[in-house]
Amino acid sequence: MKSLVGLLGYPLGHSISPVFQQAAFDFYSLNTTYQAWPTPPDVLRSKVASLRNDQYLGANITVPHKERIQDMVDIMDPEAEKIGAVNTIVNNRGSLEGYNTDSQGFVIPLKKLVRFDFKGKRVLLVGAGGAARAAVFALAGEPIQSLTISNRTHVKATKLTDIVKHLVPEVSHTGIESMEFTKAVSNADLIVNSTSIGMSGTEDPMLSPIPTSWIPPNSLVYDMVYNPPITPLLSEALRAGASILGGLPMLVQQGALAFEKWTQLEAPIDLMSKVAEEALSKTLN
Ligand code: ATR
């Protein structure tokens, strides 16, 4: 029987998830179509309820629905519960299970692609929204020495540091225009951007949250933004002589983990990455 799975968000814009997910289903010759489901907030509950129909494998969830979906599923995975957001729904014979693959999606590229050694490292995380929350839980599971969370809105950084203060030896927070922020950047081994600063389609896509002169040459700069592939922050990092990691491997990895939950098959991650890169370069042209 033909089955369906898709991406729930609003608006969806030029999402590349349908393209690389479809490549994975086709790789295994599964009779499954991955669709884009732009879903405004007022029809979200009825759309989610319809996923209990046996033709649906489930869904991926994106902005702005990841938090609200929690009360619309039947079972929450403990990891998703901890993060407070769902990015993957699995329809298990009419029962909807909520998962979050963003944390693992964030950390696996650090381990597998750039072989980052977390032991004793000082980490700076810029931003304190949903993406930052997923990153924080992943980082707290690694043997880092310190975590500084820097955000424009101070209270959000404070809240996020409170969540992990017992999980990492040294935890602190700063604004993004203070002397403390400059200091935290210059002391960091790993700098992560979880904000939308520098993302194509935003008001100021040429902006970098950090200038070249502050970035330590021996650091790794990880931008969760994947469009463009080399963001203004990553350009600054390269100019400083630092190593870089873009956001596309995270996007593909969280999707690959979702694919494995829907199908119980090993995701063809190299193929998915290649297709994602091609799809992204088409949206840039
Ligand atoms: P996501 O789910 O993608 O993380 P979000 O929860 O809306 O999205 O979080 C967006 C993050 O980017 C926040 O940390 C936000 O800062 P505020 O908490 O101050 O709003 C940050 N952000 C977005 N645009 C920004 C900008 N122009 N300057 C500084 N921070 C920005």
Image (cartoon, helix red, strand yellow):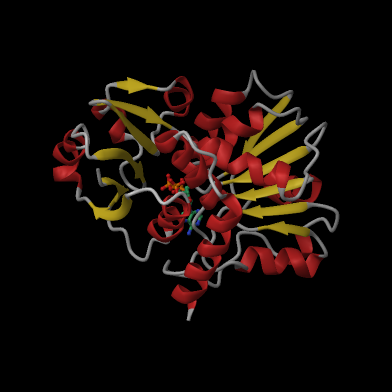
Identify which residue is drawn at 50% across, 30% down. Answer: 159
- Give left or right: position of 48 versus 126: left
Task: Using the rendered view, name the quadrant where residue 46 is placed.
Answer: top left
Q: Residue 171 location in percent, x, y?
A: 68, 29
The quadrant holding residue 99 is: top left
Q: Is residue 194 visible?
A: no
Q: Name the foreground residue: 40 vs 156.
A: 40
Q: How many marks?
A: 0
The front one of 85 and 111 is 111
Task: Answer whether residue 61 is visible to the viewer in this image.
Answer: yes
Residue that protrudes farthest toward the right in the picture: 218
* 178 relative position to 120: left or right: left
Q: Nearer the viewer, residue 169 or 153?
A: 169
Q: Quarter of the image holding residue 166? A: top right
Drawn side of residue 14 relative to residue 190, left or right: left
Residue shown at 79% from the left, 51% from the top: 186
Location of residue 4 with respect to 165 vertically, above or below: below
54, above or below 23, in the image: above
User: Residue at 52% of width from left, 70% of height from top?
Assistant: 278
| Vertical side of 261 occupied by 125: above or below | below
> What is the residue that sits farthest to the bottom in this orientation?
285
- The residue drawn where x is 51% and y is 62% is 276
| Residue 29 at x, y percent in the picture | 41, 52
The answer to whether 89 appears left or right of 44 in the picture is right
User: In the rendered image, which quarter contains the N terminus?
Assistant: top left
Where is residue 109? Give x, y as percent.
Answer: 66, 46
